[in-house]
């Protein structure tokens, strides 16, 4: 790459020294892996001229692809989606709007919002200035299926609501389990807690408070019902420790 060298003294300066073996030579060597616009500034100390040179890469469409930080993730996790090669797209990488997040043109990678289901990310790369050479790209990220059974739904058997940030509440959460009922009773059979909203994947935390009063230490009985590959129920004891 370069130009015919002048016979009289001239100074040569290329705009990008990172991808050249000599940014001050009229005919440097480059090992770029992506199309790039080079600019050469030539001066004799009095007059200055600029030469533009676009270098394209044959076979780039066979190498360029979207990649993900992980191909399979748990539900509600996020992933990093990006190009596998650095490419100076400016505004010529157009991400499709797939209701996950809105990504500006030209951004080479981004972290998705939390994924609820298997999702295919897609974009269009414009490989030439005349916009006639385009390459559609896509990457599918799969959601790892959850097991939903008695063993996978964990209910703590004790907690210490003393506001130290450790085990202060009782909580039950499972992405595939929909809670219908979670009732807690004291040893006299009085209901001291119930969830305020049905149909949630997450239990509203029980903090050991009943009618604005701290409950006494001791054992409490719980009854849990919901949907987990069909109707599901579970019961047991929770020990409140103060």
Image: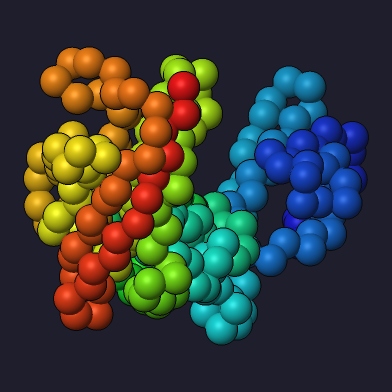
Residue 188, above or below 157: above
Residue 99, image x, y percentages: 20, 58
Name the spot of residue 61 as percent of width and height, x first: 52, 79
Name the quadrant containing residue 144: bottom left
Is residue 184 among the parts visible in the rendering?
yes
Is 101 positioned to the left or the right of 71 in the image? left
Residue at image position (20%, 38%) is 188
Residue drawn at (19%, 25%) of the image:
210
Residue 42 lies, with reference to residue 96, above or below; the image says above
For the N terminus, which image quadrant? bottom right
> Which residue, as the protein is rendered here, is positioned at the far front?
188
Depth check: give the residue in front, 150 or 219.
Answer: 219
112 and 227: which one is in front?
227
The chosen color scheme is rainbow
The spot of residue 166 in percent (x, y) is 52, 29
The number of discs equals: 0
Residue at figure coordinates x 39%, y 45% from the top left: 238
Q: Residue 130: x percent and y percent?
A: 36, 65
Q: Determine whether, in the image, residue 38 is placed left or right of residue 128.
A: right
Q: Nearer the viewer, residue 90 or 118?
A: 118
């Amino acid at each position: 790459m370069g130009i015919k060298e002048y016979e009289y003294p001239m100074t040569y300066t290329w705009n990008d020294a990172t991808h050249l073996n000599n940014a001050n030579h009229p005919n440097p060597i480059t090992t770029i892996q992506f199309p790039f616009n080079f600019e050469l500034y030539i001066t004799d100390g009095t007059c200055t001229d600029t030469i533009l040179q676009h270098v394209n890469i044959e076979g780039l469409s066979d190498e360029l692809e979207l990649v993900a930080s992980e191909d399979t993730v748990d539900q509600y996790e996020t992933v990093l989606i990006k190009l596998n090669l650095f490419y100076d797209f400016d505004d010529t990488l157009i991400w499709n709007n797939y209701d996950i997040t809105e990504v500006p043109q030209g951004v080479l990678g981004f972290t998705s919002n939390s994924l609820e289901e298997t999702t295919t990310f897609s974009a269009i790369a414009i490989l030439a200035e005349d916009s006639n050479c385009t390459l559609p790209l896509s990457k599918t990220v799969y959601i790892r299926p959850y097991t939903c059974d008695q063993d996978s739904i964990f209910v703590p058997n004790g907690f210490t609501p003393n506001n130290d940030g450790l085990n202060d509440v009782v909580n039950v959460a499972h992405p595939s389990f929909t809670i219908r009922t979670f009732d807690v009773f004291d040893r006299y059979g009085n209901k001291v807690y119930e969830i305020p909203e049905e149909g949630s994947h997450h239990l509203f935390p029980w903090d050991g408070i009943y009618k604005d009063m701290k409950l006494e230490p001791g054992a409490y009985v719980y009854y849990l019902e919901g949907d987990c590959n069909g109707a599901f129920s579970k019961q047991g004891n929770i020990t409140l420790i103060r």
